[in-house]
């Protein structure tokens, strides 16, 4: 499957950053993901689209380990992630944002991003309690890196503000900065455009392109079609837990099954 | 501007506090409060642990008196009955209590919110009953616990013990302050903010909960050991579930997410308990309940934190007015 996808994209046989093999997830009788095979190419922006309830967020939750898979497997850079808990997946290089943002409301903007550096720093309780030199050095690096990501998303002037005092658009940028601070290889964005105005969406697209330029692979779940079509180099369509199509934006827009899935939803 | 004032305010408070603390036992009019101050120091140590657990990490414990009690009893039994050096007894008590908290930590933190509160409360009840029924001396407790000493210097008067207790108390406060302002502290607050988000950025949520629980237990254990070795008499009543609730009141008054507020909370409740409400007898718990309710309703961030905020605002306005004229 992986090889087939890659040849379709012009003979690039590089190893995919993320693969799912016959991945299924059922909640009781409800099948949210049904034998989904994916191969996400490294260094690209991939969009996952589909009507509501198609299983997009469930897919993210299984990839990041919040839900265990009912069947099948997830491979990150060729390694199966069967029993890897979520925090270890983050350390391996999978970062994500959430539909409902989930910033740390008890911290400033900068502290939110500094917290994102957790898997890239080491010192623990004892280093902190006794203020060991190691802790001091690491804190300096953490602050510097956090400032870097803060400026990257354009929130430099809001560093000391409480995270939840930002408007929604900036909160979403902050959530991306926090995820970037984990220094991931793969970034999963769950509806980053939802609730944003046109200008904010433009900023978001620019940011996602810059993230890609930093050689981070991006998977995007998004309902906003102009945003998806403008950004994504590869589009995967899910419907009722199954992959019904994938291809370039242009191919997807012409695909009969995709049109049926979307129109079907609208008729209902 | 506000942030800078806040920073100065902290230093000012710490300096004033230290000066006040040093002067108390020497001053003939305040000297009578030395014993009260010892209790404030001990309760501060227990309260800080709860602040880290409840205020920073968002995990309820209604059983902190349990660890205060195990610390005191292990110390007392080892030093009095087994003849172990009191310092070593204190260390063993801290390690054993920490290990106990670690072992019960993993199963207990599978629970959240109200369930966690009830489980920790139950733990407190169980240990309290065990101390009453099986502890040496039963409900009457133990007497004749040896004093701590360094070389030939024995901590046998309140004046000496006062400095011993506050040395430990300030060390615990300082360590806690350092932890709060660190990678670890951010991880704890992240867990409070959103466990799902904390996990998504690589924080081992379960492990941090257990670790901070262990730390809070070790603080309480040290306070318990100090209590045992300075009162030379302990009884289960000092570690009853009611005491756990009082510790919660102290943490709430101090402002849950504030390390230095713990002193304020411990002092307020101790002064009420040992001075102002003596005439109320057992009815004092009603007053604590009332305080707890009022603080939670009107200033959920804590009385101490609220006062600090008001002071900061006042300073800010004052500075503005000064700039205008």
Image (spheres, helix red, strand yellow):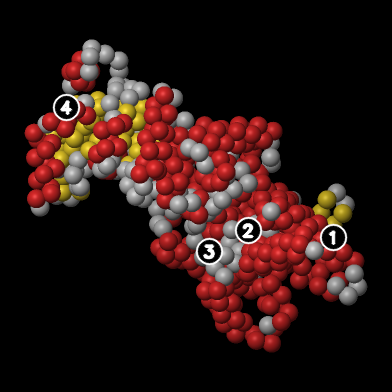
Residue A113 rendering spot, x and y as whole percentages? 52, 41
Q: Is residue A171 left or right of residue B300?
A: left
Residue A233 rendering spot, x and y as whole percentages? 28, 26
Q: Are marks 2 and 1 in contact (CB under 8 Å)?
A: no
* Distance CA(mark 1)–CA(mark 4): 76 Å
Judged from the image, the secondary structure of the residue bearing numbered disc 1 is helix
* Between B170 and A86, the one nearer to me in the picture: A86
Residue A110's quadrant in the figure? top right
* Distance CA(mark 4)–CA(mark 3): 62 Å
Q: Are marks 1 and 4 in contact (CB under 8 Å)?
A: no
Q: Are marks 2 and 3 on the same chain?
A: yes
Judged from the image, the secondary structure of the residue bearing numbered disc 4 is helix
The residue tagged 2 is B258
The residue tagged 3 is B63
Q: Are marks 4 and 3 on the same chain?
A: no
The residue tagged 4 is A251
The subunit carrying tag 3 is: B
Q: Report if residue A255 is visible in the image.
A: yes
């Amino acid at each position: 499957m992986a090889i087939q996808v890659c040849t379709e994209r012009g003979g690039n046989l590089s190893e995919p950053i993320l693969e799912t093999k016959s991945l299924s997830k059922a909640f009781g009788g409800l099948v949210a993901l049904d034998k989904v095979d994916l191969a996400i190419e490294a260094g690209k922006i991939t969009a996952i689209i589909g009507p509501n309830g198609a299983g997009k967020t469930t897919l993210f939750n299984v990839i990041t380990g919040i839900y265990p898979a009912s069947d099948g497997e997830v491979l990150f850079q060729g390694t199966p992630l069967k029993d890897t808990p979520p925090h270890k997946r983050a350390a391996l290089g999978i970062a994500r944002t959430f539909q409902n943002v989930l910033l740390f409301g008890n911290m400033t903007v900068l502290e939110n991003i500094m917290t994102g550096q957790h898997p890239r720093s080491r010192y623990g309780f004892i280093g902190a309690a006794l203020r060991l030199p190691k802790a001091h050095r690491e804190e300096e690096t953490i602050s510097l890196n956090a400032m870097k990501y803060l400026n990257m998303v354009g929130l430099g002037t809001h560093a000391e503000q409480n995270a939840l005092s930002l408007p929604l658009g900036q909160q979403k940028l902050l959530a991306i900065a926090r995820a970037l601070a984990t220094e991931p290889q793969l970034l999963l964005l769950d509806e980053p455009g939802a609730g944003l105005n046109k200008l904010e969406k433009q900023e978001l697209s620019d940011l996602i392109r810059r993230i890609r330029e930093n050689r981070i692979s991006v998977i995007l779940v998004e309902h906003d079609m102009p945003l998806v079509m403008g950004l994504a180099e590869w589009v995967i369509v899910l419907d009722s837990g199954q992959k019904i199509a994938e291809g370039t934006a242009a191919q997807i827009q012409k695909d009969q099954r995709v049109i049926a899935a979307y129109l079907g939803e609208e008729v209902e | 501007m506000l942030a800078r004032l806040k920073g100065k305010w902290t230093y000012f408070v710490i300096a004033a506090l230290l000066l006040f603390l040093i002067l108390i036992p020497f001053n003939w009019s305040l000297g009578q409060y030395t014993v009260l101050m010892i209790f404030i120091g001990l309760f501060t140590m227990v309260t800080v642990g709860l602040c880290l657990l409840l205020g920073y990490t968002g995990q309820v414990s209604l059983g902190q008196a349990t660890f205060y009690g195990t610390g005191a009893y292990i110390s007392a039994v080892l030093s009095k009955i087994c003849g172990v050096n009191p310092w070593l007894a204190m260390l063993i008590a801290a390690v054993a209590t920490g290990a106990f908290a670690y072992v019960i930590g993993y199963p207990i933190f599978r629970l959240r919110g109200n369930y966690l509160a009830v489980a920790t409360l139950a733990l407190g009840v169980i240990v309290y009953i065990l101390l009453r029924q099986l502890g040496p001396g039963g409900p009457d407790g133990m007497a004749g616990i040896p004093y701590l000493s360094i070389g030939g210097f024995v901590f046998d008067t309140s004046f000496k013990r006062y400095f011993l207790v506050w040395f430990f108390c300030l060390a615990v406060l300082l360590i806690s302050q350092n932890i709060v302002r660190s990678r670890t502290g951010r991880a704890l607050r992240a867990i409070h903010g959103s466990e799902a988000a904390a996990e998504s950025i690589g924080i081992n949520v379960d492990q941090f909960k257990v670790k901070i629980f262990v730390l809070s237990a070790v603080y309480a254990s040290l306070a318990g050991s100090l209590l045992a070795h300075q009162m030379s008499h302990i009884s289960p009543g000092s570690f009853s579930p009611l005491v756990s609730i009082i510790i919660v009141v102290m943490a709430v008054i101090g402002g849950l997410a504030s390390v230095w507020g713990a002193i304020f909370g411990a002092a307020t409740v101790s002064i009420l308990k040992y001075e102002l409400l003596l005439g109320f007898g057992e009815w004092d718990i009603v007053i604590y309940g009332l305080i707890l309710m009022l603080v939670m309703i009107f200033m959920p961030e804590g009385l101490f934190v609220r006062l600090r905020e008001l002071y900061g605002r006042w300073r800010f306005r004052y500075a503005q007015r000064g700039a205008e004229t």
